[in-house]
Amino acid sequence: MPTRIDYDAKIPNNVDLSSNRRLQRALEGWQPKFMNWWAEMGPTLETHGVYLRTAVSVGREGWAHFDHVIPQDYRWGIFLAEHDPDRRIAFGQHKGEPAWQQVPGEYRADLQRLIVIQGDTEPASVEQQRLLGLTAPSLYDLRNLFQVNVEEGRHLWAMVYLLHAYFGKEGREEAEALLYRNSGSPDSPRILGAFNEETADWLAFYMFTYFTDRDGKYQLGTLKESAFDPLSRTCEFMLKEEAHHMFVGTTGVDRVVTRSAELIREHDTLDIAAHGGIPLDIIQRYINFHYSVSLDLFGSETSTNAANYYTSGLKGRWQETRRKDDHQLTDDSAALEKPRPDGTWGTEEIQAILALNLDLRGEYIADCHTGIKRWNKILADSGIDYTFRLPHPGFNRAVGINSGYHITPDGTIVDEQTWQDGKKNWLPTSEDLTFVRSLMKPVYERGKIASWVAPPSNGINGKPFDYTYVYLT
Ligand SMILES: [Fe+2]
Ligand SMILES: [Fe+2]
């Protein structure tokens, strides 16, 4: 298994694709369809080169190759993390057995489903973000958008490779369907709700890359534990790319908050809309929205599917190997907070094996708190008396035990009327969205930045902020 990526091949890869002619031909048949999809559904802004990172090998050193590339000429390919011939299954009923190099017949349908669901999210986000290039606040931001987009395109390639290589005719059909479904399409929408929402402005983009890409990180983390080794190795490599997406989100929100704080101090008012900044309460409502729709991606709190995936070894827990238990979960239990019809909260004890979605969601929530903390620190350091909060996990939910209830950000269960009256304080209103959109004017002069966001503290790959990250003419 060569670690170096073969860039001479039509499809760059480190999976020795040329030794499997049938597979190579099938993927070469899918490639023009992908290119059509990119042309139709990918970024609308045309450029003459974007300063992009391309992986040249999957090892630690192969990561820092940067060059100006025209996005449609990006070398999308198939890269798996290095093969560990001694890898063993870390959990479930097959714990201790060698990892699978082929798909066991009895798990074929489930594995295919997991790969399709993951694969569906990748092109979806490119579709959601396709207009953002028209209004980027700086060339630096524009470059980051393209980097995220080409990598999500590559993640689609990663899942399509697995479908083609291991799931035969059905897998090839699913690979076609991944290009056929589209975000927000009334007839053939993307599978998961959050991936049908529009990413209409750059604050939404930063929130999406903070909250929704972070869900992706946790999902990939569970698939990285999979007994099916090719899936595990694929996800391991995707996680490295995903880290940059979350960096874009974290620092993006940092920079919006920083700029808002500057304007609040400068004009001595929280009402900074007239001064071209985004008021803190609008930022809070964006947090509430993006966080709550991202929580839906974790599925129901109790899930027999998740339990079966775990027992069969298809999908593990976040950092499975670092957990100090039997990795079977036959006797463990978990506590589930549940809304009750009388408007109070109750706690139910459930088997840990049934609460795996809840377990993963808990890891995710803890991680999200770190963002809230850093944004609050920016405010505190500026002497501004305002605190961002993550809403209660039951707030604004469409999936799971909370979905039949109206729950406020502080966790109060309320009736329909109270919910309708309070909503404007909790979720972005159409006025909020219109206002944020009104700020979205492209700033494409080298070294310049829009009024509503601070410049980054560092450029990309050691380049300064005023570097020409994108050639537009
Ligand atoms: Fe991705
Ligand atoms: Fe991502």
Image (cartoon, rainbow, N blue to C red):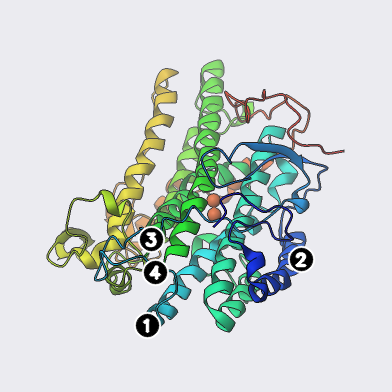
Please tell me which residue lies in front, 38 or 294: 38
Q: Which residue is mark 2?
A: 36
- Residue 319 seen by the camera: yes
In this rendering, the label closer to the viewer, 4 or 2: 4
Ligand 1 within 8 Å of disc 4? The answer is no
In this rendering, the label closer to the viewer, 1 or 4: 4
Which kind of residue does numbered mark 2 sit on? Asn
Which tag, 3 or 2, sits closer to the chain's start? 2
Q: SS for tag 2?
A: helix
Compared with residue 119, is residue 385 higher up or lower down, i.e. above or below? above
Q: CA distance from mark 2 to mark 1?
A: 35 Å
Q: CA distance from mark 4 to mark 2?
A: 34 Å
Which part of the image, by quadrant, shows the C terminus?
Answer: top right
Q: Which residue is mark 3?
A: 298
Ligand 2 within 8 Å of disc 3? The answer is no
Q: Position of residue 110 (x, y in %)?
A: 41, 76
Q: Position of residue 46 (x, y in %)?
A: 81, 48
| Residue lying at 61% horizontally and 36% vertically, measured from the top left | 64
| Residue lying at 69% horizontally and 41% vertically, measured from the top left | 52
Please tell me which residue lies in front, 5 or 312: 5
In this rendering, the label closer to the viewer, 3 or 2: 2
Q: Which residue is mark 4?
A: 100
| Residue lying at 37% horizontally and 36% vertically, measured from the top left | 370
Please tell me which residue lies in front, 230 or 416: 230
Which tag, 1 or 4, sits closer to the chain's start? 4
Which tag, 1 or 3, sits closer to the chain's start? 1
Q: Position of residue 471 (x, y in %)?
A: 81, 37
Q: Is residue 355 rendered to the left or right of residue 472?
A: left
* CB-based contact (under 8 Å), mark 1 and mark 3: no
Q: SS for tag 3?
A: loop
Q: CA distance from mark 1 to mark 3?
A: 25 Å
Which kind of residue does numbered mark 4 sit on? Trp
